[in-house]
Image (tube, rainbow, N blue to C red):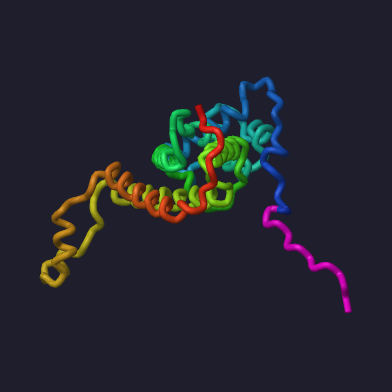
């Protein structure tokens, strides 16, 4: 009978090279930098969508050759990872006077919504299993540190952040589709009079997006507060 230890499954990214290990930081004498390339890619995605982004198009924007860009960004995958990470430089952490975990997550949710509104293509990148880089990791570390000081352990904090992440992504996706309007319902079906509640809902008109987001967010935070109230550790020294 074999006593060999069972094999552990290989991590799903084991065969991938890291974007941040493989990118040159040397500057050539052509006016290009990695930051300029990524900024041009982000601007192009903001303007025309993620599908419009290519090394060739960015090279044209920067009046350079595609081969020159590959010195800084070896592949399209690396470019997308860098673009995603660049959006986190805009992410503002909760201010120092935020007094508890709920206020910290409230700030996080609003800031996440603003980021997705500025860069709608980010949700597509996240869906493609990217490699999260230094700016993202730095933001997450700072938020986890803040939440731990208010008594949340890392596991609970990650669960709460993840739940809000899903909520914000879903809200912004619908917000982008409807743009402040209600969904389209068949007038012919409603004219039958068989669906008075739906007809009444339509007559009420759409709720302002900011108001709808705040209301739904508070529902989320209320549920979280109820679930974790017995799991909170005594907070450490409060942030000054």
Quadrant housing residue 26: top right
Inspect this view and state whether residue 84 appears: no
- Which residue is located at x 48 percent, y 33 percent? 93
Q: Is residue 157 magenta?
A: no
Inspect this view and state whether residue 2 appears: yes
- Percent from the top left, x then y, of residue 188? 15, 67
- Percent from the top left, x then y, of residue 74? 67, 39
- Percent from the top left, x then y, of residue 30? 64, 22
- Judge from the rendering whether residue 54 lies leftward or rightward of residue 199; answer left or right: right
Q: What predominant SS class does the magenta segment belong to?
A: loop
Quadrant housing residue 186: bottom left
Comparing 47 with 178, the one in front is: 178
Residue stretch rendered in magenta on the structure: 1-13
Locate the N terminus and report the quarter of the image it occupies.
bottom right
> Residue extending furthest front?
234
- Which residue is located at x 44 percent, y 33 percent? 98
- Judge from the rendering whether residue 2 lies leftward or rightward of residue 172; answer left or right: right
- Percent from the top left, x then y, of residue 169? 43, 49
Question: What is the number of callouts on the image?
Answer: 0
- Which residue is located at x 62 percent, y 21 percent? 31
> Residue extending furthest bottom?
1
């Amino acid at each position: 009978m074999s006593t060999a230890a069972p094999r552990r499954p290989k991590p799903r990214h084991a065969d991938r090279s890291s974007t941040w290990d493989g990118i040159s930081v040397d500057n050539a004498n052509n006016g290009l930098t990695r930051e300029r390339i990524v900024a041009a890619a982000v601007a192009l995605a903001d303007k025309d969508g993620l599908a419009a982004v290519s090394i060739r198009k960015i090279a044209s924007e920067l009046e350079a050759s595609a081969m020159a860009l590959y010195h800084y960004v070896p592949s399209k995958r690396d470019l997308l990872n860098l673009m995603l990470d660049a959006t986190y430089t805009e992410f503002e952490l909760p201010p120092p006077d935020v007094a508890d975990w709920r206020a910290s997550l409230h700030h996080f949710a609003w800031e996440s919504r603003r980021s997705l509104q500025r860069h709608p293509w980010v949700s597509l990148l996240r869906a493609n299993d990217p490699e999260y880089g230094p700016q993202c990791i730095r933001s997450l570390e700072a938020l986890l540190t803040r939440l731990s000081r208010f008594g949340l352990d890392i596991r609970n904090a990650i669960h709460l952040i993840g739940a809000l992440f899903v909520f914000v992504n879903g809200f912004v996706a619908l917000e982008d589709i409807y743009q402040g309007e209600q969904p389209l319902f068949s007038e012919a079906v409603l004219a039958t009079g068989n669906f008075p509640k739906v007809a009444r809902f339509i007559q009420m008109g759409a709720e302002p997006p900011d108001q709808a987001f705040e209301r739904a967010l508070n529902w989320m935070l209320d549920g979280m507060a109820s679930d974790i109230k017995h799991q909170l550790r005594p907070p450490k020294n409060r942030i000054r």
